[in-house]
Amino acid sequence: MSDFEPKVVAFVCNWCTYAGADLTGTSRIKYASNVKIIRFPCTGRIDFMLLLKAFANGADGIIVSGCHPNDCHYTSGNFHAKRRWIMFKELMDFMGIDMNRITFSWVSAAEGAKWADVVNATVTRIRELGPYVSYKEMVDKSVEEEVKNG
Amino acid sequence: MDNLVKRAKELLENKTVQVVIGYEAGPTGVIRPAFITDPEKAGKLIYNDKCDQNLAVYLTKKEVKNFGKMAIVATLPVMRSIMMLISEQQLFAESIVVLGISADGNLLDIADINIMQGYIEKSDLSNPEKYKALLAELNKLNPEEKFAYWQKELSKCIKCYACRQACPMCYCTRCTVEVNQPQWIPVQANTHGNMEWHILRAMHLAGRCISCGECGRACPVGIPCHLLTMQLTDQVYTYFKVYAGTSDKMNSVLSTFEPNDKESFII
């Protein structure tokens, strides 16, 4: 497993975390390059289905990040997102999908160093957990099922 | 039961309502929904402990609404569904008459929505006892066992969407599964796509599910999909201290928020 490089997808909001990640770069802070950042208008826009699609398409870990509570550009997007994530987490725990692979965080536009920490911590954790084999197996098996069933 | 028939007949005779939605026994004795429009046929209406279908699903159907004003035989889950439908502006309180049935099978006198609300608030709103044991059992498993269990169950799904059709809260005329740009849920039935569908369904019903268990009963291959929504009903109560369908003015949990919502996993 030593040559395993985790694939991490980050769903971030435009106004805080994306700008925060930008600051990480302009501050010349180094962080793991395993992360692929996808920019959204707001955390309220991040549909839970996108997280599932990321796993289905081969992601080993996911980061979801946005503005701190009360800092949302649209006033309440992150509060709505918070409730949705609470429910999503409980549902995933109930179905046995590995929530250790998803990091939820608040990173503001001024927290370039925190963004680097969040990414590094996530990548380290995923490296220990290894590839998300059980989910990938299910997806592969489903493709086979489809071929078999025509 | 006689009271129910009498009341239904009365309502139809003095033209307060144009249709009574209730239960009848089919030719083989199977309980099925009945739509009574003729007062002479009100005698067909029955109520017993086998009448467990959630009839509220018909209240939003165009074919039924076309009859005119409706009266509906309503047990507790049906009353809660009605509350949810009114709070989500899918139904006018004035357009229905509720023939409430108490837990022991007697006709309740429910004159208006406030009386119905009072009755709902007095009742036990948590998940029905028979499902609680199953939920507790599943919650004891470790993550791998849970994942294996749901994969096994969901591999049976044939994507007939009976769970959706039977649910009074799934009234969208265009469901996300019918959207194909982007194709969120694959059309074919396979374990992975089935799991995505059931996660999507449970999430869309989070904080709206009224624990009637109709989705599980409707499933032709016996997937306990009602446990997913019922687990979330439990969690909604744990986190937000509300049960769905208790007021005609409430917002569903995921469409509103409190600034001090508590969680422990966001860093």
Image (cartoon, rainbow, N blue to C red):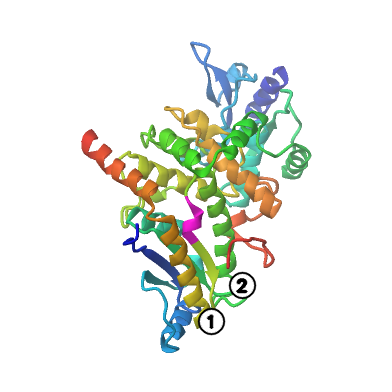
The secondary structure that dominates the magenta segment is: helix
Spot occupied by residue A150 in the image (x, y as percentages of width and height): 20, 36
Task: Write the start and end of the magenta stretch as one range.
Answer: A98-102
Let me know if marks 1 and 2 both belong to one chain.
Answer: yes
Per the rendering, the mark at residue A69 is: 2
Image-based side of A133 in relation to A102, left or right:
left
Per the rendering, the mark at residue A111 is: 1
Dividing the image into 4 quarters, which one contains the C terminus of chain B? bottom right
**Of the residues shown, which amino acid type is indicated by label 2?**
Pro
Whichever of callouts 1 and 2 sits on the residue coming sooner in the sequence is: 2
Judging from the image, mark 1 belongs to the subunit labelled A
Q: Nearer the viewer, mark 1 or mark 2?
A: 1
Judging from the image, mark 2 belongs to the subunit labelled A
Spot occupied by residue B45 in the image (x, y as percentages of width and height): 61, 20
For this rendering, which residue is in front, A39 or A74?
A: A39
Determine if the magenta segment contains residue A100: yes
